[in-house]
Image (cartoon, rainbow, N blue to C red):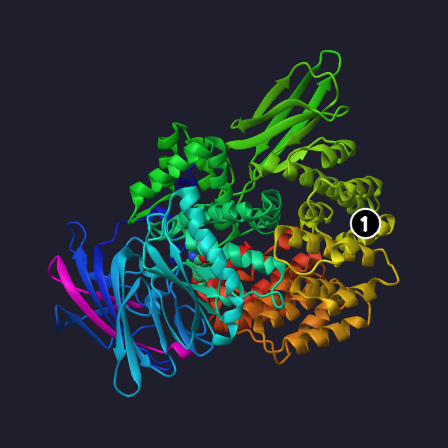
């Protein structure tokens, strides 16, 4: 096993290392918080019961960030203290004390959206990872678990609703038009799970009866006018609660479960115990304003946060290096939930597409890190696709290797053993081993080695002897700080088909490739075999095969694993496009034929067809090439789209018409029909058909749902048609008071495939509705533009300069959100020398900005290495 820790060179200060973990010197069994809430000046009094943890004479150190103590009392007596940076240090004599501190904070001035902040006139909190120290002094680390009692006092007219974690215990009126409420959370929790909300909110409520008969009151809290948009989230919550009981045996544990939607939020949502706080984009949905994609995302995020109640809250993380313990596992759980609500195959395709779009490039670039990192500077930078999505793949591989019963036995053991504690990734794996008897020693490399493994698979057949031989070889690429890698355990689901009969030659087998190479032989193979490998994407790896165009076309028509069937089609398209970019031209005939066959297969579900006939994205094509040429990729992809559009125009029109008559219904069939309709419209337009823009405009205009409306708008915005101006104006005016839909208006333009997108995006940054203060809006324009490969890399560095300017400005307000947008600039090594130099010089300019945040400094300096 590689020991990356021993190999790492000394690093400058500010680096936190996993190897330095020590148990806390002081524990806090209980905390009482008393908030006198006011947007401009909130008073916070905290009373902590602390106990010395072990034999030592270390002082009590309480983390603080930007806090000035107004008073510090030990056992009721004012006591001297010192400040070390933001940390409050108190020398205390005994082994147990009551500590009281008072501070004043200014939520309205909090633009970082960490700690207590104001959003849309309401007050709310975000404490993960280190926001609690911006509210009060506390040992702000996940292995200090305490029982919380919270009292809030606020102006009753302005903040009629006062919510916190746990169950409500008392409330009443106070003097001067103020009122108060007290909440108590009986479950010890780390400070990052603390939450409160004060606001003018209304709730959509329901009751859920748990498997042991406990009645839970559910509430989704939003602005009154948004109440009609909360039914979908509430329904998803009930489904999630039932699913976790059925699939993992996990029951909810408090009398109330509240969700609050806020418009200003750095991430998607937060799993605070009993009081989830959500970015409103993952709660609000109705047919007029939310796409099918939004509906699915709402359900997935509601489920994700709910599932954290066990995987994250009841069992939390010992330290932030273990973040994937809760995040990888919870993503795996929410993926399972979503798969069970509709088409599991399409869900798997979407998840793999997401992994390839976000995690594979991360793993191949300057910010690559293991699923369990060894060090960080700013923990907010580690809420990554690697921790979340690769982490989920690692859990999935264990489930595949163990099988469903043993995996469930492993999770039962984990939850039972570590309930109420802060655990590690190692604890999870050890439970899996104990419950199954499977040795996962080598498998643990998935936690410590970064980089996407590559598997080369070549199948040879000797017709004479009837013997087929499959050679497998793996390699794991070097990543920053990890030059040499050991072979990993790769669970590969493999099957062979006969090319003539289309029958299986051998049943599917699960091959655990654990050495650098391996051979498998198959006897009695009388016809030419075709290899189906990594079925269901059983391992998150890149597979290179020697499969011919004919083999891929065969699999795209006959493979009985839907993912493998999709994958064969993608590979066929990818091979064609890579050939086109590399050699200047390519034969499109095989792709056209394979797409025609898929479109004509009545047995396939429409959602699957829509996924299968979609070409790989520009950036995924780029990932296959030694040097990315964005313009060439775009042109070759467009050429293939045009040929597909022309050659199959009647089929696209037929598919389009078949879906057109349907009235909106949010169901797997309805979603599939709309998806195929949009994809078909795209191909009709790509064909150059004279009526393309009219079709798109008619769809846009007559739509009874946002999926169709945005589909029509997107097609127009990508086109040369003048109708795009009218469509953009109509859309803007119709939704001018809906921030989430205006985000779509910005994003659609930022993602446009037109030649003038960079200029249009620059102009939009001066639009009166554009603001960097709202993370959703910043991401909709700047984030979307930076992943529009062609537009971002066009114009001799114009796109880079624009993004760098925006990031410098955003960093002043909200470093976390700014730092998340660095990766597109950090990919400079993948581009030609001229582009690389321009990208680097923008990164250098950012790094030279006075007062740059720790978040940005870490991301940008790593990106320059
Ligand atoms: N634990 C949350 C993600 C999250 C992390 C940090 C945040 O700070 C701004 C917010 C949310 C989840 O996995 O959903
Ligand atoms: Zn999570």
Which residue is outermost to the right?
690
For image coordinates 17% across by 57% down, the residue present is 51
Magenta-highlighted stretch: main secondary structure? strand
Q: Is residue 514 shown left or right of residue 253?
A: right
Residue sitting nearer the eye, 630 or 675: 675
Taking the image in four quarters, ligand 2 sits in the one at: bottom left
Q: Is residue 43 visible?
A: no
Q: In the rendered structure, which segment of residues is drawn in magenta? A: 83-108
Residue bearing mark 1: 640
Q: Residues within 10 Å of mark 1 (few under 14, many from 20)?
A: many
* Image location of residue 403, percent across then percent down: 47, 32
Query: Please, is residue 408 above or below residue 792 in the view?
Result: above
Q: In what quadrant of the picture does the N terminus appear? A: top left
For image coordinates 64% across by 79% down, the residue present is 767
* Image location of residue 371, percent across then percent down: 46, 45
Query: Please, is residue 573 above or below residue 83 in the view?
Result: above
* Image location of residue 576, percent across then percent down: 78, 42
- Write down the quadrant of residue 58 in the picture: bottom left
Across the whole image, how many numbered discs are drawn on residues?
1
For image coordinates 49% across by 73% down, the residue present is 812
For image coordinates 75% across by 52% down, the residue present is 633
Instruction: Mark 1 and ligand 1: say if the CB distance to the nearest ligand atom is below 8 Å.
Output: no
Question: Does residue 94 show up magenta in the picture?
Answer: yes
Which residue is outermost to the top?
465
Residue sitting nearer the eye, 823 or 309: 309
Q: Is residue 282 visible?
A: yes
* Image location of residue 542, percent across then percent down: 61, 39
- Write down the quadrant of residue 185 in the picture: bottom left
SS at mark 1 in the image: helix
Question: Does residue 504 show up magenta in the picture?
Answer: no
């Amino acid at each position: 096993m590689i020991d990356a820790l021993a190999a790492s060179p000394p690093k400058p200060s500010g680096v936190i290392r996993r190897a330095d973990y020590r148990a806390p010197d002081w524990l806090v069994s209980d905390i009482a918080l008393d908030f006198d809430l006011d947007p401009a000046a909130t008073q916070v009094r905290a009373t902590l019961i602390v106990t010395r943890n072990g034999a030592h004479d270390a002082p009590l150190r309480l983390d603080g960030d930007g806090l000035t103590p107004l008073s510090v009392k030990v056992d009721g007596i004012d006591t001297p203290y010192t400040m070390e940076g933001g940390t409050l240090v108190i020398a205390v004599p005994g082994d147990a004390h009551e500590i009281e501190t008072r501070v004043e904070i200014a939520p309205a001035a909090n633009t970082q959206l960490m700690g207590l902040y104001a959003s849309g006139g309401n007050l709310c909190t975000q404490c993960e990872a280190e926001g609690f120290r911006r509210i009060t002094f506390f040992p702000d680390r996940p292995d200090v678990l305490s029982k919380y009692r919270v009292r809030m006092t606020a102006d009753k007219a302005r903040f009629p609703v006062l919510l916190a974690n746990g169950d409500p215990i008392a409330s009443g009126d106070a003097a001067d038009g103020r009122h108060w409420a007290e909440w108590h959370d009986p479950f010890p929790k780390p400070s990052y799970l603390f939450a409160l909300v004060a606001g003018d909110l209304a709730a959509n409520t329901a009751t859920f009866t748990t498997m042991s008969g406990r009645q839970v009151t559910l509430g989704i809290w939003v602005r009154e006018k948004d109440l009609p948009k909360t039914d979908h989230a509430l329904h998803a919550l009930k489904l999630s609660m039932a699913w976790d009981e059925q699939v993992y045996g996990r029951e909810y544990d408090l009398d109330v479960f509240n969700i609050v939607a806020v418009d200003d939020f750095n991430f998607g949502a937060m799993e605070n115990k009993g009081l989830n706080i959500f970015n409103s984009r993952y709660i609000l949905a109705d047919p007029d304003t939310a796409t099918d994609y939004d509906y699915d995302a709402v359900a997935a995020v509601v489920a994700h946060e709910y599932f954290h109640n066990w995987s994250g809250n009841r069992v939390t993380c010992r330290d932030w290096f273990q973040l994937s313990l809760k995040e990888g596992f919870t993503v795996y759980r929410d993926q399972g939930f979503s798969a069970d609500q509709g088409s599991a195959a399409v869900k798997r395709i979407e998840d793999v597409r997401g992994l390839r779009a976000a995690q594979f490039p991360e793993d191949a670039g300057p910010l690559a890190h293991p699923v369990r990192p060894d060090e960080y500077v700013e923990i907010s930078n580690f809420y990554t696709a690697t921790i979340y999505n690769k982490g989920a793949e690692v859990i999935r591989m264990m489930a595949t290797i163990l099988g469903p019963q043993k995996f469930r036995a492993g999770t039962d053991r984990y939850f039972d053993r570590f309930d109420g504690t802060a655990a590690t990734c190692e604890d999870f794996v050890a439970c899996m081993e104990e419950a199954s008897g499977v040795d996962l020693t080598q498998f643990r490399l998935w936690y410590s080695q970064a980089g996407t493994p590559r598997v080369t698979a070549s199948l040879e057949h000797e017709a004479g002897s009837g013997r087929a031989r499959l050679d497998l070889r793996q390699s794991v690429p070097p990543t920053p700080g990890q030059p040499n890698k050991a072979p990993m355990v790769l669970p590969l689901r493999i099957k062979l088909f006969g090319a003539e009969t289309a029958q299986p030659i051998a049943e599917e087998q699960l091959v655990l490739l654990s050495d650098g190479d391996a051979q498998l032989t198959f006897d009695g193979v009388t016809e030419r075999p075709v290899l189906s490998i990594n079925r269901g994407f059983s391992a998150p790896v890149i597979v290179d095969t020697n499969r011919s165009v004919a083999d891929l076309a065969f699999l795209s028509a006959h493979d009985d694993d839907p993912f493998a069937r999709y994958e064969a089609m993608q590979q066929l398209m990818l091979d064609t496009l890579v050939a086109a970019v590399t050699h200047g031209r390519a034969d499109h005939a095989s792709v056209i034929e394979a797409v025609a066959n898929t479109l004509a297969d009545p047995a396939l579900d429409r959602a699957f067809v829509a996924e299968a006939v979609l070409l790989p994205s520009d950036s995924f094509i780029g990932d296959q090439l030694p040097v990315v040429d964005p313009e060439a990729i775009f042109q070759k992809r467009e050429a293939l789209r045009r040929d597909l559009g022309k050659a199959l125009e009647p089929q696209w029109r037929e598919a389009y018409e078949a879906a057109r008559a349907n009235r909106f219904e949010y169901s797997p069939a309805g979603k599939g029909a709309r998806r195929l309709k949009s994809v078909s419209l795209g191909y009709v337009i790509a064909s150059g058909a004279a009526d393309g823009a009219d079709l798109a405009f008619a769809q846009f205009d007559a739509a009874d749902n946002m999926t169709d409306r945005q589909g029509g708008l997107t097609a127009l915005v990508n086109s040369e048609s003048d109708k795009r101006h009218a469509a953009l104006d109509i859309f803007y005016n119709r939704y001018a008071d809906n921030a989430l839909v205006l985000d779509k208006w910005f994003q659609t333009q930022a993602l446009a495939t037109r030649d003038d997108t960079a200029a249009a995006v620059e102009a939009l940054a001066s639009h009166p509705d554009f603001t960097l203060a709202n993370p959703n809006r910043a991401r909709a324009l700047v984030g979307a533009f930076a992943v529009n490969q062609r537009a971002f890399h066009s114009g001799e560095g114009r796109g880079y300069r624009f993004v760098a300017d925006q990031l410098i400005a955003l960093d002043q307000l909200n470093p976390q959100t700014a730092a998340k947008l660095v990766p597109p600039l950090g990919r400079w090594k993948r581009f030609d020398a001229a582009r690389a130099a321009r990208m680097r010089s923008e990164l250098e300019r950012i790094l030279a900005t006075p007062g740059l945040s720790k978040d940005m400094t870490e991301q940008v300096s790593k990106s320059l290495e």
